[in-house]
Amino acid sequence: MNQADIYFSSQSKSFQDVLKEVQAYLSGKYATLLSSHPAEQKQQIIAYINQYLTDHRLHVPGLTLDELIDRLYAEMVEYSFLTRYLFSKDVEEININGYNDVKISYTNGAILSAEEQFATPEHAVNVIRRLLHQSGMILDYSQPVVRGHLANNIRITVFGPPVTDKEKGIAASIRIVNPKKLAKDDFIRSGTATGEMLDFLSLCLRYGLSICVTGATGSGKTTLMSWLLSTIPFDKRIFTIENGAREFDLVVMDDDRNVLNNVVHTVTRYSEDPRQNIDQEKLLEYALTANPDIICVGEMKSAEAFAAQEAARTGHTVITTTHANSCLATYYRMVTLCTQKYEMNDKTLYNLVTEAFPIVLFVKKLEDNVRRIMEITECRILPDGTREVVPLYRYAVHSTREVGELIRIEGDYEKVSDISPGLQKRLLENGLPLTELQHLKTGGIDA
């Protein structure tokens, strides 16, 4: 009789009962796990699980032996059923509303209930605590709200008792930022933008115009900015600044692992000692002496906004993101952030930030879960010093209708205006070929 025959001739038990038995068995075996290498240690643990299941002929209905082993390992060593979602390239967010209510947001816009749920409120709390522990974060009654990063591209916010109802166990939002790199065709195919719009933004950044990408959380700002930075020629030096954890991965290597482009990635380091604290503002200060061609500030959310606009107004190309509800509102948001550094007249600050970031694009995730660049604007400085925010491209919604239980939003991208002669002159002075400029001015909108 082979191993599979033994397994399926066994008596059935629930997964939780099998889990308790295997946990009790392995508690006496951990001391024998001599390997310090995670891969080898995993193989040893799986071997013990396999041996115990086979010897005791334990069986869970609906699961093969291999599936049961994988679930037991994930439950005891990893992060229960969350493990496969955390490391999936097709998942961008895990939202836990309670121990028995877990929703998964996929990169294609679908939001579905997880196939599994936590067994009890205590089970949910224990798994999330284990997840937080890997990054040195603690969740308990004295710290019932935790926010931070689990890895370079995973953000987490957790709410536990007594902030949440004890019978719910826990609430959490786990956002997996930019799980996979997108190409220009991906944005066009998904309806995020037209080819002409993407070419326009790429050329603006390449030839020295500072850009701010604005929108709500989850609107796709970071993914779009990552693609824009990937279009920069390899000989141009990109210096990225991020808060808390690194989400960008812009280094390009050939098959022999030789680095082809010119990128420096930096991340803030928090310290209660002000002398040891390295925030985005300080990294910006250092970046200016590091010979950058393009400075990327992952997100402006505090006093670093003033340093970013100073860098952009003094000859550096800066690309950044912030949270705002429109292109126009972005400048007022920047003014508010700048006042956290200096008490200056709002009009003065407005003039500074509009000069610093002539190009702003507003990205939004619509009700049909499609991410779109809703508008690209240019802020023009008129001869009398006043400012005029002019739309260059926009997405015009024609209709919104229900198809079954789904919402369908229909519209078209429109080219509203060419960039001003002043910005055309700047682009040409910064090396943009005249033929490229003429193409941008006369090219049609891609479907």
Image (cartoon, helix red, strand yellow):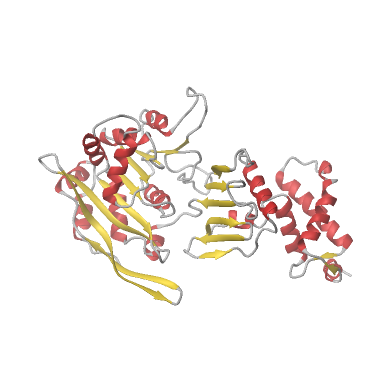
Q: Nearer the viewer, residue 214 or 335?
A: 335
The C terminus appears in which quarter of the rendering? bottom left
Q: Residue furthest top?
A: 275
Is residue 210 at all visible to an observer of this figure? no
Q: Dividing the picture into quarters, in which one does residue 9 lie?
A: bottom right
Q: Is residue 284 above or below residue 19?
A: above
The N terminus appears in which quarter of the rendering? bottom right
Is 114 on the left or on the right of 337, as rendered? right
Q: Dividing the picture into quarters, in which one does residue 289 lie?
A: top left
Coordinates of residue 378 in the picture (x, y in percent): 22, 49
Q: Residue at x 82, y 53 (%)?
A: 48
Q: Nearer the viewer, residue 363 or 286?
A: 363
Q: Residue furthest bottom?
A: 404
Q: Nearer the viewer, residue 264 or 7?
A: 7
Total labels drawn: 0
Coordinates of residue 59 in the picture (x, y in percent): 81, 66
Coordinates of residue 140 in the picture (x, y in percent): 64, 41
Q: Nearer the viewer, residue 118 or 322?
A: 118
Q: Residue at x 20, y 41 (%)?
A: 429
Coordinates of residue 177 in the picture (x, y in percent): 49, 50
Is 293 on the left or on the right of 243, as rendered? left
Q: Residue at x 40, y 42 (%)?
A: 299
Q: Dividing the picture into quarters, in which one does residue 190 lie?
A: bottom left
Is residue 103 at all visible to an observer of this figure? yes
